[in-house]
Image: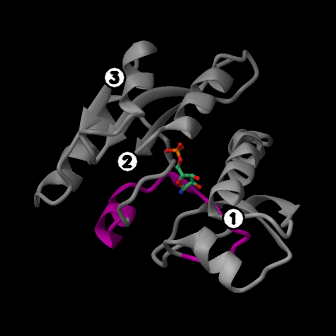
Amino acid sequence: MVKINACVFISGKGSNLKNLIIKSREYNFPIKISLVISNNKEAEGIKHAIRNYIPYLILNTKKRNSDYKILNALKKYKITLICLAGYMKIISKNFLRSFKKNIINIHPSLLPKFKGLNTYKKILIKKEKKTGCTVHFVNEQLDSGQIITQKSFFIENNDNEETLKDKTQQLERFAFPEAIIKIYKYS
Ligand code: GRF
């Protein structure tokens, strides 16, 4: 099977990256992780790229030419899908216009609810009954692009930010691969 070259953008732990690397080894999974990009040189997730011999790039995205450097790397590795997995930087409009292929993001809420940061705290304050995660296409508005997949669970009385995070991230392991399969199923 000819696989799509994907790049995973991270800023932290990289548990979604780790999971996607494992999934991508399955014969029928449509993508290969060909590049990892981090805007944080301390990101724990970089170790998954190193251990799996995946090329990686660490960039200071505060520098003016960082978008240019990223776009060059994406071109070099023939990337046609970007997966944002805990990437703590907003993708600029210029970047979106230059990279005309798919960009998807995983967000720890049932969008359109609770966009942006501090999701778990906001969910608890609002006394939601249900929460989950969403994989969506990235557009020019924050956490607002077309939804590809959502997975949800019921919140229990004794849940706190930590337990919500654990439960949400367990669902993310299924949601991200499922969304990728959906995108490429009929192409
Ligand atoms: C995930 O929970 C994702 O929803 C959010 O950031 C977290 C990243 O976790 N956008 P990890 O770096 O993949 O472990």
Residue at the (43%, 37%) spot, across then down: 79
Rendered view: 84 above or below 34: below
**Label located before the other in sequence (2 or 3):** 2
Q: CA distance from mark 1 to mark 3?
A: 37 Å
Q: Is mark 3 within 8 Å of ligand 1?
A: no
Q: CA distance from mark 1 to mark 2?
A: 24 Å
Residue 146 position by quadrant: bottom right
Q: Secondary structure at mark 2?
A: loop
- Extreme-bottom residue of the structure: 126
Q: Secondary structure at mark 3?
A: loop
Place of residue 62 in the rendered image (x, y in percent of width and height, measured from the top left): 16, 60
Image quadrant containing the N terminus: top right
Query: Which one is in front in this view, the residue at disc 1 or the one at disc 3?
Result: 1
- Whether tag 1 and tag 3 are in contact, CB under 8 A, the answer is no
Residue that badge 2 annotates: 11
Residue that badge 3 annotates: 55
Rendered view: 164 above or below 17: below
How many numbered marks are there? 3
Residue at the (39%, 24%) spot, across then down: 47
Magenta residues, as a range?
91-115
Q: CA distance from mark 2 to mark 3?
A: 16 Å
Place of residue 91 in the rendered image (x, y in percent of width and height, measured from the top left): 37, 64
- Whether tag 1 and tag 2 are in contact, CB under 8 A, the answer is no
Rendered view: 71 above or below 115: above
Answer left or right for 152 relative to 60: right
Query: Which one is in front in this view, the residue at disc 1 or the one at disc 2?
Result: 1
What is the three-letter code of the residue carrying label 2?
A: Ser
Q: 10 Å neighbourhood of mark 2: few (<14), some, or many (≥20)?
A: many
What is the three-letter code of the residue carrying label 1?
A: Asn
Rendered view: 166 above or below 159: above
Residue that badge 1 annotates: 160
Q: Secondary structure at mark 1?
A: loop
